[in-house]
Image: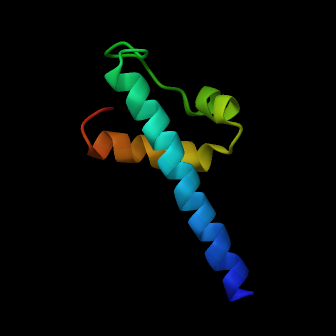
Amino acid sequence: MEEILNEHSRASRGQVAGIYQAIRDRICLLHYPPGKKLAEYELAEEFAVSRTPIRQALQRLEYDGLAE
């Protein structure tokens, strides 16, 4: 059972990293203009995930100074 949880945890981290990178690229390439509000719900639909990995990616972007 512990192995299954560890595999799920790794997949989740990889999923968040991929979402983070995609959103980061869009911000850096100005696909999202400065000041644009990024809605968790819309991003979750677009990436076909729950809001949790979106929230984690947005928190990381905020920490990196790329989002507020």
Residue for point 54% across, 42% down: 54
| Tally of numbered tags | 0
Considering the image in quadrants, where does the N terminus appear?
bottom right
Q: Position of residue 17 (x, y in %)?
A: 48, 50
Q: Is residue 15 left or right of residue 59?
A: right
Residue 60 located left or right of residue 15: left
Residue 20: where, in percent of width, then height?
45, 42
At 52% from the left and 41% from the top, the residue drawn is 19
Q: Quadrant of the C terminus?
A: top left
Please tell me whether residue 64 is drawn above or below residue 8 in the rendered image.
above
Give the residue furthest to the right.
1
Residue 51 image point, x, y percent: 62, 43
Report the coloring of the rendering: rainbow
- Residue 65 x/y as whole percent: 24, 37
Residue occupying the point 43% across, 15% down: 31
Position of 28 compared to 1: left or right?
left
Residue lying at the far left of the rendered structure: 65
Residue furthest to the bottom = 2
Query: Which residue: 33% across, 16% down?
Result: 35
Position of 11 relative to 3 (above/below): above
State which quadrant residue 39 falls in.
Answer: top right
Answer above or below: position of 45 versus 13: above
